[in-house]
Amino acid sequence: MIIQELKPSKRVEGRWLAVMEDGSILRIGEGEVVSFALYAGRELLEEEAVRLLDAARRSGLKSKAIELLMRKPQSRKELERRLLEWEASQEEAEAICDRMEELGYLNEPEYAGRIVRHYAGKGFGQRKLRDELYRRGIPRELWEEALSQVEDHAPAIDAFLEKKLKGSRDPKEIKRASDALARRGFSWSEISDGLRRYGMEVWD
């Protein structure tokens, strides 16, 4: 297998295009160009070609992982699942996740805090926040630190009641608002405290 042409990609920085004698194009990283001593006109033995193809595949997986993490933060579990969808082996997926952590692209404590702040900012309670951390595969040992970033849910509850009730004291409206707060992840003690602040008499 002979490399007819070797040129840098115009679209992706750090990527090279090796045009092979059969017209196929192999997309490789700078590391493969150097480690395999590639140049136009170089003939690859069958064994070399197999190793180069495998190295290019793994390099492509790393590039896709970085692109994904730069576009949208992920948990390790989410990234690992995506790598497996891209046909990485389990061992490759774990190794790439390890590398992404080393490079700082994969940062679960930071991601967990971002999730908590995002959903708390939308007016959701602790139960919803925990559900989101669980759904995204955040390790449980990171939950409490992330959740501690939002200690007071009272303002969110008060704002919700004011918006929904608009001064109403109708028991049916109060019940609907309370149920809605429960669905948003707030505990009954938090809801009842909110109703008291709103001026309602509540019995626990």
Image (cartoon, rainbow, N blue to C red):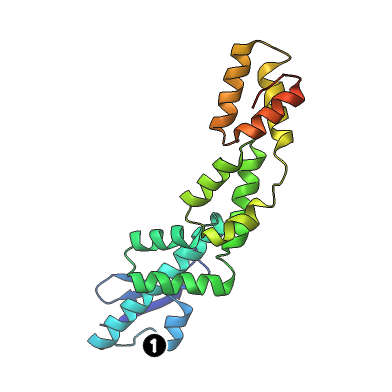
Q: Is residue 24 left or right of residue 166?
A: left
Residue 145, by quadrant, is bottom right
Location of residue 97 with respect to 140 vertically, above or below = below
Q: Is residue 203 left or right of residue 128?
A: right
Query: What residue do we see at 42% from left, 82% from top?
Result: 32
Residue 45, by quadrant, is bottom left
Residue 161 placement (x, y as % from top left): 68, 24
Which residue corresponds to mark 1?
A: 36
Q: Nearer the viewer, residue 80 or 37?
A: 80
Residue 60 placement (x, y as % from top left): 41, 69
Disc 1 residue crowd, few under 14, some 14–19, many 20+, Cα 10 Å: some
Q: Nearer the viewer, residue 52 or 16?
A: 52
Query: What residue do we see at 25% from left, 87% from top?
Result: 47
Residue 72 placement (x, y as % from top left): 54, 54
Query: What residue do we see at 55% from left, 55% from top?
Result: 71
Q: Secondary structure at mark 1?
A: loop
Query: What residue do we see at 61% from left, 32% from top?
Result: 188
Q: What type is the residue that disc 1 sits on? A: Phe
Location of residue 65 with respect to 33 vertically, above or below = above
